[in-house]
Amino acid sequence: NDILPLSNSVPEDVGKADQLKDEGNNHMKEENYAAAVDCYTQAIELDPNNAVYYCNRAAAQSKLSHYTDAIKDCEKAIAIDSKYSKAYGRMGLALTAMNKFEEAVTSYQKALDLDPENDSYKSNLKIAEQKLREVSSPTGTGLSFDMASLINNPAFITMAASLMQNPQVQQLMSGMMTNAIGGPAAGVGGLTDLSSLIQAGQQFAQQIQQQNPELIEQLRNHIRSRSFSSSTDEHS
Ligand SMILES: *[C@@H]1O[C@H](CO)[C@@H](O)[C@H](O)[C@H]1NC(C)=O
């Protein structure tokens, strides 16, 4: 039998590596992510050609917010097994957490190509696509205002009320109304309306930033925390 083995792994090592993976999976369940990384690393040292070990370590690294390491592990897993949908899915999660939405979309699409029935890939793909649209929207601030949460935020209401007292804002609003109702821009195809709306939105955001930077920070955190729907999935 002259088939060359993929690695120098001896059977005992392969068995031990599998035990270490199981240990790692138990640490994951107990949320001991650093210990899990340790076990998967040892498993990889004994059997470097098992894609599952890299993929599982990627999940642990993501839990520790080590997204760059997680992505490297996913790439390694995919290099070993190009049909490993879970590795693409996990890479998508890590990329989303790093706000790399374009790459995240590509990753989830690949995961879905390989596993078209998986609902968590479908919903995570939608989230990444939505985020991508938000960051490449015409206002270009990368800051999306979640209206529902804004309206429920007392600090926002207070500030909106004080903004309305601002003569500049009042002028802006009345300008927008005029255009909307049939001012100079009416009949020009709505282009001027749109750009003045965008301008108004930007000025509005700037006003908020000046008057209440904390609110912006709160909003950013809020948006961030909603953007990462981490899945507590099974470990192979
Ligand atoms: C979808 O993928 C996740 C992550 O890989 C996995 O945990 C889950 O079991 C999959 N769901 C289905 C329906 O295959």
Image (spheres, rainbow, N blue to C red):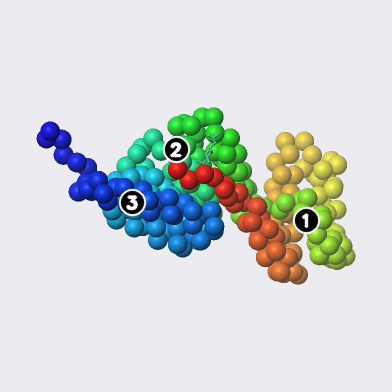
At horizontal 22% and vertical 48% (from top left) the residue drawn is 10
Residue 236 on image: x %, y %: 45, 43
For badge 2, the amino acid type reads Ser
Q: Which mark is residue 17?
A: 3
Q: What element carries label 3?
A: helix
Q: Can residue 36 be seen in this view?
A: yes
Q: Residue beneath label 1, please?
A: 150
Mark 3 or mark 1: name the one nearer the start of the chain: 3
C-alpha gap between disc 3 and disc 1: 50 Å
For badge 1, the amino acid type reads Leu
* Mark nearer the viewer, 3 or 1: 3
Seen from the viewer's position, the closer of residues 185 and 224 is: 224
Q: Is residue 58 visible?
A: no
For badge 3, the amino acid type reads Ala
Residue 5 on image: x %, y %: 19, 41
Q: Residue beneath label 2, please?
A: 85
Q: Quadrant of residue 184?
A: top right
* Mark nearer the viewer, 2 or 1: 2
Mark 2 or mark 3: name the one nearer the start of the chain: 3
Residue 138 on image: x %, y %: 63, 48
C-alpha gap between disc 2 and disc 3: 22 Å
